[in-house]
Image (cartoon, coloured by chain):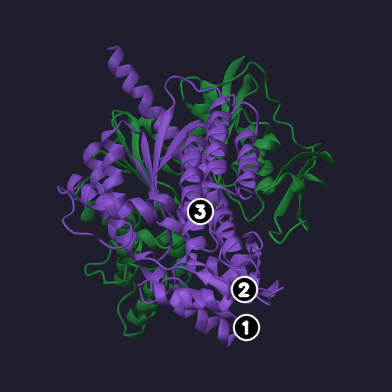
Chain colours: A green, B purple
């Protein structure tokens, strides 16, 4: 039997899953939409991963990361539950040992990780608002009637990208409407948008951090070649985009789980297991904590959200 | 019984000394501590505040409204060196428009403390007001603040390593209860030393190479645990000793003596005072960098202008000394999950750096 490790990255928009062996080779992978239901998304994802695996594979470790890591970690009984910043750093390091800067733009958040000798020395994450993230890009693509898959290609055809305000999504949007209404060609607007994402990212997340090569770009937006090209122009550095750039968080967490693997084998069978979250508002004081009770097979296994022990009473 | 019911905005546990002072100076009035800050407080505060004002304004306005709802009719508020200096004027206008009828005792108006005006006000609230008594109890209160802050230093350095859960928090509650009942300075003094011993004797499990993190930032958000989502405590739980210089003792009594020294120490980065606590925080950042701290966390409320000015300088200091720094900006509704992710990643980073340093020294 061959030992393998499962890593799942449950993001706001998409859920990514990989199975790797002890040498970090990819045995199976999938990328699906979360669609607001992480539990169902993970069930679908695991079914698809199982189909890709041969019968002599045993899962010896499970790691979860991403914004729903805690919930899914409980559901799968994961041996590692870690934040996505560490997961991305570990995953990228395994494939690009001398990487110095990781740019990551996802659906709702964006981050920058700086490494030196394979050690994370600094990182930054966007605060408060989702400006310059994939969600903004896809909503603007819809407004312009450009399929998000074509977006990058269209941007590459532009010779004179328009200037779009880069500071804030709301300003960028009104700027964009204005540019469209005065008749700029669509490819120039699309290219301008890619540039505004890059500038916004460097201003809001980078904030003057020293970006040194090799630079690796990942997250869903890294699949957009228009944005990649703008990054190259602005940073004057070659940008590496791995073919598995969208899976890097999942790969990282799988690696972490392999390092802390115990001897038990995970059956990956969830058909007969029910899993539900019941939310309620605690009435004991005016904090009104939103208490989440997590049930596995109708049995309460965990409670979150209480600021004090009174919230634990069911 | 007088008709006055005096209250004041909350900040951390400092309601204890404030209540102590007021209750000894205004014997006839009822001193009411506002209800503890909850999500409702900030909801109320944000509802009636201009959106782009700094968050402490919203918190203090929220507590004042809650206090007024509980029947308070005199509100005491102070001021400071930034927008804080203008809080009271704006809050009076907002509360009047909402139809509340109350007296506002403004200790700092237009950036200045008018002793004569405060005296007249105090005389009005309590005709038997005595300056001598005010001096004596003022002295005890100042000492109480100092002792509380000193105990807090001990707590922050050790709470992350406590063996029995909440032992530090429970002991502090007990101490504050005793503090608020002291009658003489001598009593306070001996209580402080008793509790200091108790705190130092609490059982802890501190490894030899524990992490040390320095906290700097805007005064209200860094001091009020509710406003920073208990960041200090969350961080300590990872097994980190925390150092924070910003406290009331520093701001009120030490700052004016130390600021020149601090400016001198950071003369390679800044030349002039930058308003509020910006220069202090830059100096502290440099101190942490040069004293083997593993990382720095900077906290501010959104739209805090002096700290926004300080942040680029702090990043420069930290990148020069290669110490990681994490910036937090808190608003009325920040997602707790996001904060958690950042703290976790910060801790992972500290660990990875430590491992790397060890591997270098081994070779």
To which chain does the residue with label 3 belong?
B
Q: Mark 1 and mark 2, same subunit?
A: yes
Q: Earlier in the sequence, mark 3 or mark 1?
A: 1
Cα–Cα span, label 3 and label 1:
30 Å
Picture residue at 36% right of the left edge, 29% below the top? B353
SS type, badge 1 = loop
Picture residue at 52% right of the left edge, 50% below the top? B338
The spot of residue B17 in percent (x, y) is 55, 54
SS type, badge 3 = helix
To which chain does the residue with label 2 belong?
B
Q: Earlier in the sequence, mark 1 or mark 2?
A: 2
Residue behind mark 1: B100
Q: Mark 3 and mark 2, same subunit?
A: yes
Residue A115 vertical position relative to residue A201 in the rendered view, above or below: above
Cα–Cα span, label 1 and label 2:
9 Å
Count residues near mark 3 (Cα–Cα under 10 Å), then give few for <14, some for 14-19, many for 20+: many
Residue A179 vertical position relative to residue A267 in the rendered view, above or below: below
Q: Which mark's residue is nearer the viewer, 3 or 2?
A: 3
Front residue of A202 and A43: A202
Disc 1 vs disc 2: Cβ atoms closer than 8 Å?
yes
Decide if residue B20 is in sight here. Answer: yes
Q: Mark 3 and mark 1, same subunit?
A: yes
To which chain does the residue with label 1 belong?
B
Q: What quarter of the picture does the C terminus of chain B occupy?
A: top left
The spot of residue B119 in percent (x, y) is 46, 74
Residue behind mark 2: B65
């Amino acid at each position: 039997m061959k030992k393998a490790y499962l890593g799942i990255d449950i993001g706001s928009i998409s859920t990514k899953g990989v199975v790797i062996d002890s040498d970090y080779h990819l045995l199976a992978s999938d990328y699906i939409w979360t669609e607001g239901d992480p539990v169902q998304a993970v069930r679908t994802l695991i079914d698809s991963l199982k189909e890709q695996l041969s019968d002599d594979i045993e899962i010896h470790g499970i790691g979860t990361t991403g914004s729903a890591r805690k919930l899914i970690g409980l559901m799968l009984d994961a041996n590692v539950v870690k934040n996505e910043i560490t997961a991305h750093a570990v995953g990228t390091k395994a494939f690009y040992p001398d990487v110095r800067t990781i740019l990551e733009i996802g659906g709702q958040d964006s981050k920058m990780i700086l490494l030196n000798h394979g050690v994370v020395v600094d990182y930054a994450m966007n605060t408060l608002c989702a400006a310059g993230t994939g969600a903004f890009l896809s909503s603007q693509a819809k407004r312009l009637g450009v399929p998000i898959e074509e977006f990058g290609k269209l941007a590459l055809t532009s010779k004179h990208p328009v200037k779009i305000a880069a500071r804030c999504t709301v300003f960028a949007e009104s700027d964009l409407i204005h540019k469209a209404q005065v008749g700029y060609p669509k490819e120039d607007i699309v290219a301008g948008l890619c540039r505004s994402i890059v500038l916004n990212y460097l201003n809001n997340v980078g904030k003057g951090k020293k970006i040194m090569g090799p630079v690796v770009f990942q997250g869903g937006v890294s699949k957009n070649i228009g944005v990649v090209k703008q990054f190259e122009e602005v940073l004057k550095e070659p940008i590496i985009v791995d073919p598995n750039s969208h899976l890097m968080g999942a790969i990282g967490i799988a690696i972490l789980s392999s390092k802390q693997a115990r001897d038990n084998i995970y059956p990956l069978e969830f058909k007969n297991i029910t899993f539900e979250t019941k939310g309620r508002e605690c009435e004991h004081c005016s904090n009104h904590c939103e208490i989440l009770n997590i049930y596995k097979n109708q049995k309460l296994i965990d409670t979150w959200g209480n600021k004090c022990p009174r919230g634990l009473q069911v | 019984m007088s008709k006055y019911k005096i209250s004041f905005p909350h900040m951390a546990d400092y309601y204890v000394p404030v209540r102590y002072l007021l209750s000894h100076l205004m014997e006839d009035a009822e001193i009411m501590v506002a209800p503890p800050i909850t999500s409702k407080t900030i909801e109320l505060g944000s509802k009636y505040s201009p959106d782009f004002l700094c968050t402490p304004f919203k918190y203090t306005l929220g507590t004042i409204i809650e206090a007024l709802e509980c029947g308070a009719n005199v509100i005491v508020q102070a001021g400071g060196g930034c927008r804080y200096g203008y809080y009271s004027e704006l809050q009076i206008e907002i509360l009047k428009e909402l139809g509340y009828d109350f007296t506002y005792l403004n200790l700092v108006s237009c950036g200045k403390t008018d002793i004569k005006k405060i005296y007249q006000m105090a005389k009005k609230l309590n005709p038997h007001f005595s300056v001598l008594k005010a001096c004596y109890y003022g002295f005890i209160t100042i000492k109480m603040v100092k002792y509380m802050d000193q105990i807090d230093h001990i707590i922050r350095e050790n709470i992350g390593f406590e063996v029995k859960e909440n032992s530090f928090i429970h002991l502090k509650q007990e101490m504050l209860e005793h503090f608020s009942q002291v009658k003489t300075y001598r009593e306070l003094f001996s209580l402080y030393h008793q509790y200091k011993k108790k705190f130092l004797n609490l059982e802890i499990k501190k490894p030899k190479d524990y992490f040390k993190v320095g906290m700097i930032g805007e005064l209200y958000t860094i001091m009020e645990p509710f406003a920073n989502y208990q960041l200090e405590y969350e961080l300590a739980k990872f097994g980190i000793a925390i150092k924070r210089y910003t406290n009331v003792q520093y701001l009120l009594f030490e700052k004016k003596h130390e600021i020149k020294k601090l400016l001198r120490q950071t003369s390679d980065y800044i030349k002039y005072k930058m308003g509020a606590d910006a220069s202090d925080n830059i100096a502290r950042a440099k101190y942490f960098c040069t004293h083997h701290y593993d990382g720095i966390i900077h906290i501010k409320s959104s739209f805090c202008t002096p700290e926004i000015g300080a942040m680029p300088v702090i990043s420069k200091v930290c990148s020069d000394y290669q110490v990681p720094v994490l910036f937090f900006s808190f608003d009325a509704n920040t997602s707790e999950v996001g904060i958690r992710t950042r703290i976790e990643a910060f801790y992972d980073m500290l660990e990875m750096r430590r491992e790397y340093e060890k591997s270098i020294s081994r070779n």
